[in-house]
């Protein structure tokens, strides 16, 4: 087992453990902290794949901004322990089975297509490894995808306006 | 190098756990967090395929997904605050205005 594979299994186990803990924690703030563990582990996996810019954005935007927003709202609303009502029995045992089936289906389908992907990848992988992928990524953003990139700023502006309108107190 | 299949399987597992959390959780904020978990699983698949194909399109798409997720979190948490203010609860079972 190479060191890379060892790091992968370590980070994968960490992320799966965080996701399982998200399900089993009763308090929303504990769930939020578990989700932060998942996100940091995923950032490590991105680094392992050589996507260092995505890893940095993952830590800054997901781990920093979005999760802080979640924790902020949990504390603002003073969310307590989850109360379990027995109103929906449907999402019990069948729910687990269906989720497991979905997991297996997605995994097999994607893994099969991944096999053809690897075989079709020629020396392109080496190009990414040699050049700085952040530089290539910035060239792509500001050259090929500049209009979608500018549109996202409008999206964020609209989202800010929407959040303000939703959360303001009616006078 | 770690095979792409491993990343894909991990991504599917994380997505499935996100679906499970979505089905089982009763707190609206936790349900919202499980959506973020599913988005993260999809991002992992994107980066893995980007690495496998040797093109950076996948990573670029991940950046757009993250931007949209940030916008979604802002609006969604605004809605959560509104629900908490109007109904005095975060339990989705109690938010049943549209239920028959």
Image (cartoon, coloured by chain):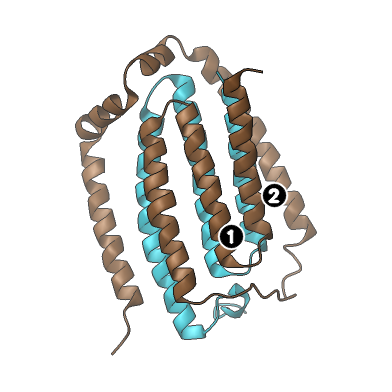
Chain colours: A brown, B cyan
Q: Seen in the image, is B1 located left or right of residue A70?
A: right
Which of the 4 quarters of the picture holds residue B63?
top left
> Which quadrant holds the C terminus of chain B?
bottom right
Q: Are marks 2 and 1 in contact (CB under 8 Å)?
A: no
Q: Residue at x 41, y 56 (%)?
A: A66
Q: Secondary structure at mark 1?
A: helix
Determine the residue positioned at 23% across, 51% down.
Answer: A153
Point out residue A134 in the picture as x, y percentages from the top left corner.
31, 28
* B38 over A145 or under it: above or below: below
**Which residue is situated farthest in the right direction here?**
A93
Which circle marks residue A147 in the picture? none
Pinpoint the chain carrying mark 1.
A
Q: Is residue A57 above or below residue A70?
A: above
How many marks overall?
2
Does B80 appear above or below B49? below
Please state the chain letter of the residue tagged with numbered disc 2 in the rendered image: A
Question: Considering depth in this image, is A166 or A28 the residue closer to the camera?
Answer: A28
Q: Which label sits in the foreground, 2 or 1? A: 1
Q: Quadrant of residue A95?
A: bottom right
Answer yes or no: is residue A117 visible: yes
State the residue lying farthest toward the front.
A3
Q: Residue at x 24, y 48 (%)?
A: A151
Identify the residue under disc 1. Answer: A31
**Helix or strand or loop: what does disc 2 sit on?**
helix
Please indicate whether residue B21 sits to the left or right of residue A148 in the image: right
Label 2 vs 1, first from the N-terminus: 1
Q: CA distance from mark 2 to mark 1?
A: 19 Å
Query: Residue at left 48%, top 26%?
Result: A49
Question: Where residue B65 sits in the image (x, y, percent)?
Answer: 40, 45
Q: Label 2, on which residue?
A: A99
């Amino acid at each position: 087992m190479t060191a890379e594979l060892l790091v992968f299994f370590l980070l994968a186990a960490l992320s799966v453990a965080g996701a399982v803990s998200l399900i089993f924690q009763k308090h929303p703030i504990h769930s939020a902290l578990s989700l932060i563990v998942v996100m940091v582990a995923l950032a490590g996996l991105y680094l392992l794949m050589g996507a260092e810019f995505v890893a940095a954005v993952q830590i800054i935007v997901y781990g920093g901004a979005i999760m802080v927003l979640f924790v902020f709202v949990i504390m603002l609303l003073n969310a307590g322990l989850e109360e379990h009502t027995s109103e929906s029995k449907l999402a019990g045992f069948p729910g687990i089975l269906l989720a497991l089936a979905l997991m297996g289906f997605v995994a097999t389908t994607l893994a099969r297509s991944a096999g053809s992907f690897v075989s079709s990848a020629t020396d392109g992988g080496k190009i990414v490894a040699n050049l700085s992928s952040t530089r290539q990524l910035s060239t792509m953003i500001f050259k090929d995808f500049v209009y979608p990139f500018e549109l996202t700023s409008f999206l964020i502006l609209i989202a800010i306006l929407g959040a303000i309108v939703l959360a303001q107190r009616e006078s | 190098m770690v095979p792409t299949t491993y990343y894909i399987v991990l991504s599917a597992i994380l997505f499935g756990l996100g679906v499970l959390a979505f089905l089982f959780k009763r707190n609206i904020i936790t349900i919202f967090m499980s959506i973020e978990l599913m988005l993260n699983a999809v991002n992992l698949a994107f980066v893995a395929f980007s690495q496998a194909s040797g093109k950076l399109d996948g990573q670029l798409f991940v950046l757009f997904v993250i931007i949209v997720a940030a916008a979604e979190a802002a609006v969604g948490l605004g809605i959560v605050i509104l629900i908490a203010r109007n109904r005095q609860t975060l339990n989705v079972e109690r938010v049943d205005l549209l239920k028959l």
